[in-house]
Amino acid sequence: MALPVLNTAKYEVTIPSTGEKVIYRPYLVKEEKILMIAMESNDNKQIIRSVKDVIQNCIEDINVNDLTLFDLEYLFMMLRGKSVGESININAKCEKCDELTPYDISLDDIKAPVVLDDSAKTIMLTDKIGVNLRYPSVDDMVLMGGSAVDGLSADTSFDMMTMIIDTVFTEDEVFKMSEQSEEDQKRFIDGFNTQQLSLLLDYLDNVPAMSANLKFDCIHCKHKNEVEIKGLNSFFI
């Protein structure tokens, strides 16, 4: 006779970028093992791939490859909360001495990413040439080595700019960036002046991310901290 199957509770969560509501279950021992192996590897690419696998397993009717990076971060954090507890223990870094202090964050205190208005995704580079941008995807970050958007080096920031440009348009034509040769993409980005470059970097800096406000006294130097943390990496310090 086969062993009985354990029932698991189900919950509802909203995908930040689309507003779509989806049903999920807490992750189980089999998914916990996947995450533990990935975390022990200290390999950002492996961690992101493992998080993708867990989300795909635990959330109904979802294609994880369609998610933005901040969708993945937020959904995983909500999933983790229901799987291991309603609060998350992190080590918060003191803004004065850089030492770490244990801190418990309630799920209720985590703010969902605020999606930008569509108009913020269109940037005019000149009077006649503009770009339509998109959010970085999960796969973009894997290609970038798994780093957070705000942790990219100068070289990878340039690569990311190529990825987030959906289309380039003029008064008469629209060009799909992904359909252009690597040489043409590089020539286009290399032709930016400082002001045009800063417009795209500002967009990257303001990509939505989950966040939480922390207030704590450092256990080392007693400094009273009031800091905001953003992105999945910050919640696993």
Image (cartoon, rainbow, N blue to C red):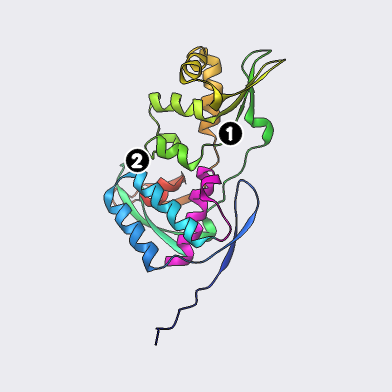
- Callout 1 crowding tier (Cα within 10 Å): few <14, some 14–19, many ≥20: some
Q: Residue at x 32, y 58 (%)?
A: 36
The magenta span reads: 60-84
Q: Residue at x 51, y 40 (%)?
A: 137
Residue on which disc 2 sits: 96
User: Rounded to the nearest whole Å, what is the CA distance between mark 2 and mark 1?
Assistant: 36 Å
Badge nearest the viewer, 2 or 1: 1
Residue extending farthest bottom: 1
Answer whether residue 89 is visible to the viewer in this image.
yes
Q: Position of residue 154 (x, y in %)?
A: 39, 24
Q: Quadrant of residue 123?
A: top right
Mark 2 residue type: Lys
Image vertical order of residue 209 relative to residue 187, above or below: below
Quarter of the image for the N terminus: give it.
bottom left
Q: Residue at x 29, y 47 (%)?
A: 42
Q: Position of residue 115 (x, y in %)?
A: 62, 42
Question: Is label 2 in a helix, a strand or a loop?
Answer: loop
Residue on which disc 1 sits: 134
User: Which disc is residue 90 wearing?
Assistant: none
Numbered label tally:
2
Mark 1 residue type: Arg
70 in magenta: yes
Residue extending farthest right: 172
